[in-house]
Amino acid sequence: MAKDYLTQFLPDLEEFKEKTMQFHNGELTVAEYKRFSGGFGSYAQRGGQKHMLRLRMAGGRLTKERMHFIVTRCEKYGIDRLKMTTCQSIQLHNLKASDLCPLMEEAWMAGMISRGGGGDFPRNVMASPLSGVQKNEYFDVMPYAEAAGEYLMDFIKAVKFPRKLKVCFSNSPENETHATFRDLGFIARANHTFDVYIAGGLGIQPKLGICAASQVAPEKILYHIKAMVNTFTTYGNYENRGKARTRFMQETLGIEGLRSAYQVQLAKVLETESLDLHILTSQPAKQGIGSAISHKRIIPQKQNGLYSVFYQPIGGNLSPCKAAQLYQLIAPMKDVEIRLTPQEGLYIINCNSKEAQTLLEATDDGARNPFETSTACIGASICQVGIGDSQSLLSACINAVRKENFADGVLPKLHISGCPSSCGTHQIGTLGLRGGIRQTPDGPAPAFAVFKGGCPIRGKEVLADMGKSILAKDLPEFLIKLGRMISADDSYYEAWIVLHHEEFDQLLAQYTETTPLCAPNKRN
């Protein structure tokens, strides 16, 4: 992050310190403090005694310098939990109030400004994590994501948004960042241009985005960002927060009306502003050495002889000890850096075969198969608005399923959210779960609604509908029975479910109560 922003944002820290002190003195309610602190990328955790700090890093680029900062501050402040997020950022958890303010200031001084990491602001800009090194990508979108991240920082103090604004870039049809259903998404095309999608989003009343512009030259992306900002602030709902996300403009304006409104704003920006980008891209100068290497977690890059190593800590929880170990390993490796994924994992890119082997061995404590790469939000044990304990559920399911030794792919990757906000992206998963409470004869009990059939791939996008729910305690058993059914057919979930929807529903019905799932109407 450019040091120029310090001049704008450092004075704000005094007010943050004051509000944090008032909160701990009981002078501010949880809701009052949350509305303020979110704009600094920080929230009080459940119980109000500890805090979280979310560090923004455009495109999920966890450079050596950023990694070094995180490692040293974990040591300095005794930080015991790091959580990777589906927006390619890292959250530092369980912070004491006395440590929060100095840590935030140090992060800002180091170029990791958290301002706007929460609240009604432009959020961390996302990009395909292997952008620039991925074979068969259309082109490298990372420089444009970083430029967009810098540009959006200018709006944090200058513009009052109705709600948050999420911007992302995709380098291929895989659409790993969900760019076709974010507030603003740039989709790379084979001819080195972008298609621009607007007003999509997950959560309450999710919607796919609409294509508002096609074949946009990359150097013109800032005009489109400004046009979206102007469209949102002109037509967004400032009265009802539940209807204040960009996707609700599809309802108030209609799809064609929204597209037209956006084009009007774009024309004004093109006429009155000079926002062309001039980006020089470069490839790693590094050369591959040694013999070729092959493993399911090693991805050959488009740069000959270089590799990326995939690592998924269970539940996206990167321990400070593991972060320190990874930093020590990559520090002397030329051009190597970490890229966070939108699925709470990471890639270590630009490794030669020897480095890749070393890092592969150092990361053998992570997910063993696709099912164990399941995404789970931080959950109700920490999140103030959480309903279901996503992390505990995932741990229980993995521990139970490991005893079955299913083949890879028998069970799919889960997407688990603790509430309707879809922080675990449950609405786009092949199999998603969303936390709530079910009334049982013994009283209220944690339960998760089942979402089936979501898909983020461009041209095949599907947002899953909510189905019946299962008590949290029954989910491990349900998954074991499902895995056994699929294994008996010598199949894997993605192929099996196409032909066996009825069998799936019959199994689900064995765990379905007649009482509906209860979940407060959480906002996303």
Image (tube, grey):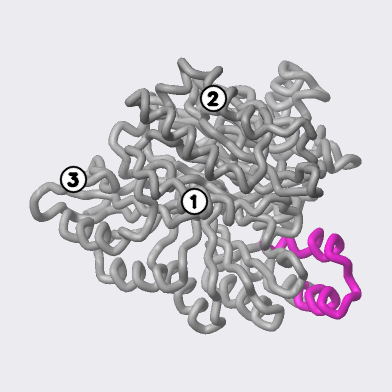
The vertical placement of 436 against 352, above or below, is above
- Label 2 vs label 1: CA separation? 27 Å
The numbered disc on residue 512 is none
Tell me, yes or no, whether the two marked residues, 2 and 3, touch with CB atoms within 8 Å.
no
- Residue 130 image point, x, y percent: 37, 44
Q: Residues within 10 Å of mark 3 (few under 14, many from 20)?
A: few
- Amino acid type, residue under disc 3 in the picture: Ser
The numbered disc on residue 344 is 1
Q: Nearer the viewer, residue 325 or 413?
A: 413
* SS at mark 1 in the image: loop
Q: Main secondary structure of the magenta part?
A: helix
Residue at image x 32%, y 40%?
134
Q: Earlier in the sequence, mark 2 or mark 3?
A: 3
Q: Which residues are magenta?
A: 16-41
The vertical placement of 400 against 63, above or below, is above
The numbered disc on residue 504 is 2
The numbered disc on residue 294 is 3
Residue at image x 75%, y 24%?
250
Q: Earlier in the sequence, mark 1 or mark 3?
A: 3
Tell me, yes or no, whether the two marked residues, 1 and 3, touch with CB atoms within 8 Å.
no
- Label 1 vs label 3: CA separation? 23 Å
- Residue 233 image point, x, y percent: 79, 39
Count numbered badges in the picture: 3
Q: Is residue 72 left or right of residue 326?
A: right
Of the two numbered discs 2 and 1 in the rendering, the one whose residue sits closer to the viewer: 2
Residue at image x 69%, y 56%?
380
- Residue 30 image point, x, y percent: 83, 64
